[in-house]
Structure formats: structure tokens, C-alpha cells
Image (spheres, rainbow, N blue to C red):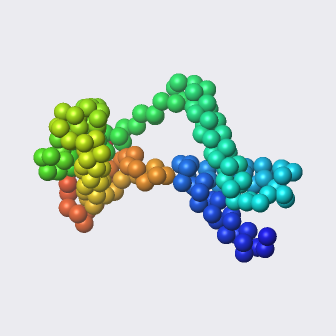
């Protein structure tokens, strides 16, 4: 296989794996494991469909990755697994509460029942007499509106997936939304 085809092949493999693991770094690790398994195999040279075989190897490697990660999480001490308590979390919670109150009544009610109250989407769909998929779409749209409002008005620390983790700080150019504490009140 020439370098152009091998680069395309590797790109396809990386894309396929990336869709199945949480981060690009994890995808690179899994791809490296797949390539190691492929190179170590005596069958590699005699294959009719290398892509199909490599995808089967990748599927096993992805399953191994998730299995190892799940097993590793349960082996940690409970105090290490628990989320660290931070004083900054209150700011983010206050900001989200205020922005939640500014959503239209339907969106606010959905998010309060599901995200705040802990009601399952399936139960709520039955109670409202709508399909589960329809409710799921409505919840996703409401969450998107809340997220958009949050990022439009506040600076927020995010995790690697882009999800807010805290703390919130009002953007001066957006006007004071009142979500962050007054300077010097900490």
C-alpha cells in the first residue's frame, strides 16, 4: 500500500474510532492499539478486505477501551471518584438558575422537571401525552437555548467536551446579568 492510500486508510480508521470514544486523545490511543494488533498479526498480509478486518480489530479495541475504563473507575477509592467540591460551583448554579427563569414557560417547565426535579423523559412524555422522541427533541432545544444564553452573557470554564463546569463571570459587554457575586463579596 502506498503512502497516499495508507494515509487515507489511517484517516478513515481514526474517524471511525473517534466516533466511538469520548476524546481525540482516546481515539489516538485506540488507533495505536489497533495498529499494534494488526502489525503483530500473521494474517495481515493474506487478507482480501483489509478495511473490514481492521474495523473488526478496531471494534474489539474500542470495546476493550470502554471495558478497561469502566473497570478502572470502580477500582478507585470512593473519595477519588466523587466530584471535588468547589466554592465556584455556586456561581455557575446561580447563573443557570437566573437564566432558566428567563426561558419561556414551556422550556423552563421541561428543564425544571427533568434536569432539576430528576423526572425521567419517558415518564414526562407519558404524563404530557407526547412521544418520547418528541419530548427528547424539545428538551434538547430547551437545553440549547439555556446554553446559548449562558455563553452569550457569561464567561464560563468548560471541560474538554465544552460543557460548563464553573465558575461564571458576567461579560461586561453583555450587561450585568447578576449571576456572579459582587466584587469583594467572596
* Residue 156: image location, x then y, percent: 36, 53
In the displayed structure image, the side of residue 114 where residue 17 appears, left or right: right
Nearer to us in this view, 91 or 111: 111
Q: Quadrant of residue 10?
A: bottom right
Residue 98 in sight? no
For image coordinates 17% across by 41% down, the residue present is 109
Can residue 13 be seen here? yes
The residue most toward the top is 78
Instruction: Tell me what residue is drawn at x 61 percent, y 26 percent.
Output: 75
80 to the left or right of 106: right
In the figure, residue 117 lies in which quadrant? top left
How far across and how far down the image is residue 34, in percent?
72, 51
In the image, 183 versus 36, the foreground residue is 36
Q: Residue at x 52, y 30 (%)?
A: 81
Marker count (numbered):
0
Q: Is residue 72 above or below residue 45?
A: above
| Quadrant of res 87 | top left
Q: Residue at x 28, y 50 (%)?
A: 137
Q: In the rendered view, would you say 52 is above or below 74?
A: below
Horizontal and vertical percent for residue 145?
25, 55
**Along the viewing direction, whichever of 102 and 12 lies nearer the viewer:** 12
* Residue 174 x/y as whole percent: 23, 63
Amino acid at each position: 500500500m502506498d503512502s497516499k492510500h495508507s494515509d487515507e486508510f489511517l484517516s478513515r480508521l481514526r474517524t471511525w474510532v473517534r466516533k466511538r470514544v469520548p476524546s481525540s486523545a482516546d481515539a489516538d490511543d485506540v488507533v495505536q492499539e489497533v495498529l499494534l494488533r494488526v502489525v503483530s498479526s500473521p494474517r495481515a498480509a493474506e487478507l482480501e478486505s483489509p478495511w473490514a478486518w481492521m474495523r473488526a480489530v478496531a471494534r474489539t479495541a474500542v470495546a476493550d477501551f470502554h471495558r478497561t475504563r469502566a473497570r478502572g473507575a470502580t477500582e478507585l477509592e470512593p473519595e477519588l471518584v466523587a466530584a471535588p467540591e468547589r466554592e465556584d460551583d455556586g456561581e455557575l448554579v446561580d447563573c443557570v438558575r437566573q437564566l432558566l427563569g428567563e426561558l419561556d414557560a414551556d422550556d423552563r417547565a421541561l428543564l425544571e422537571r427533568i434536569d432539576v426535579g430528576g423526572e425521567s423523559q419517558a415518564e414526562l412524555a407519558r404524563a404530557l401525552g407526547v412521544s418520547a422522541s418528541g419530548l427528547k427533541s424539545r428538551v434538547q432545544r430547551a437545553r440549547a437555548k439555556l446554553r446559548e444564553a449562558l455563553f452569550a452573557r457569561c464567561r464560563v470554564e468548560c471541560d474538554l467536551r465544552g460543557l460548563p463546569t464553573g465558575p461564571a463571570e458576567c461579560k461586561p459587554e453583555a450587561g450585568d446579568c447578576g449571576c456572579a457575586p459582587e466584587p469583594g463579596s467572596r
